[in-house]
Image (tube, rainbow, N blue to C red):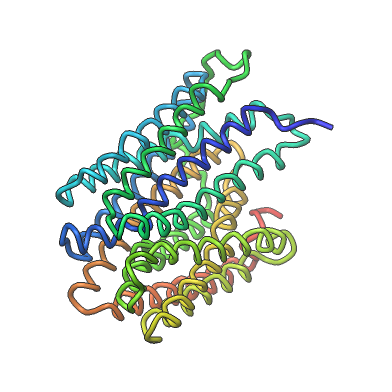
Amino acid sequence: MNRIPRTVWALGIVSLFMDLSSEIIHALLPLFLTTTLGVSVAFVGLIDGIAEATASISKVFSGYVSDRIGRRKPLILIGYGLGALSKPLFALAGSAPVVLGARFADRIGKGLRGAPRDALVADVTPKAIRGRAFGLRQSLDTVGAFAGPLLAMVLMAAFADDMRQVFWIAVIPAILAVLCVIFGVEEPRDHGQQSAARAPIVFADLKRLDRPFWIVVAIGVVFALARFSEAFLILRASGEGLPLTFAPAVLVVMNVVYALGAYPAGIASDKYPAHLLLAWGLAFLILADLALALWPGLVGAFTGIAFWGLHMALTQGLMAKLVADRAPSELRGSAFGLFNLASGVAMLAASVLAGLLWDLAGVRSTFLAGAGFAAIAACALLLSRSKSGQNLQEAPGT
């Protein structure tokens, strides 16, 4: 039986340490910005929107560059290195622009390392166990996503709610992640030649992407508009009386539900039409927004947070599958590049709009607007299915 290569284990541990570091900070950052630095919720939305859009857009090009230079590890190291270098800036930040710069650098790093890291997993793993290898790396990454907010709560209690002290502790796992890349990650010896990699977006080929693909892009954009940054979930729970020490519990609950639902959702995606799962995902997002808007107290807030996690489980992997199904195999790089670009810009707009609504019209308006965009996405989903006469899961010509 083939063993999972050492490099895959190393990349999984790297992901664990960096996610541990990032989630310690992200679980507290919205409250740090609003209570310590005194910025508006609109600016919180702007920071998170720019950060996530940056990650989505930089993903478009990183895989192409790693193919072009014939090396994976340099980009992986630069990506994790940028993430580690950004961490002390959060502890030192005396103004919101410094936080924005730190988030920008961190998310560029995330975008740079993602595609080369996944490509390296495929490079070093025999095809027969490739699924297990990717599953292992994702599982270790998820451990960091759970452990980060949990550790943040422990540290907040230990340091009497001093968020800067907690941010300094978050630097340690980030450094460990970089050291694991340097000393634990190895590339195949025969993977050092430059390749004639295909650019991720070739505009001359756009006319070859048919209407069904653009329908998926349109639905993805409306999905992104309906699902703004999780920072607003933390702010909502805090506004309902969640003590500062326990603010990271918001991400713990969301990620637990997400992780528990993702695998059954993946099984279901092989058995049921894509439009059905997307519809259920939108239904849970609408329920999440309505609970967060209309159900007062922490019970309502955490019910909405749990529904948010269910929405993520049902839709995140499925949208990528739809893009792959709707694009010719030789244009998939361009297709994913366009989809990430459109979704990233939409996420930026969604987070900025959510913050402005929060400040100008109140908390409820933010989540009611999210429910409205989710309803629009559901209508677009039904319209696309009725006009195409086929399930979204079917590729053209099947």
Question: Which residue extends farthest bottom?
Answer: 295
Left or right: residue 139 versus residue 110 is: right
Quarter holding the C terminus is bottom right
Which residue lies most toward the right here? 1
Task: Specify whether residue 203 is in view.
Answer: no
Where is residue 365? Give x, y as percent. 29, 79
Counting from the top left corner in percent of width and height, residue 190 is at 63, 14
- Foreground pick, 318 / 171: 171
Q: Quadrant of the N terminus?
A: top right
Residue that appears at 46% across and 50% down: 339
* Residue in the foreground of this view, choosing between 278 and 242: 242
User: At 49% from the left edge and 78% from the top edge, which residue is drawn?
Assistant: 303
**Closer-to-camera residue (236/280):** 236
Depth check: give the residue in front, 118 or 77. 77
Q: State the image coordinates of residue 347 (x, y, percent, origin top left).
A: 36, 57
Q: Does residue 269 show up?
A: yes
Image position of 338 with respect to 41: above or below: above
- Circle count: 0
User: What residue appears at the point 57 percent right and 62 percent down from the top-left corner?
Assistant: 313
> Looking at the picture, how far across and down is residue 65, in whole percent?
44, 26
Q: Quadrant of residue 29?
A: bottom left
317 up-or-down from 177: above or below: below
Q: Please give the name of the residue rendered at 19% of the width and 72% of the height, measured from the top-left corner.
A: 359
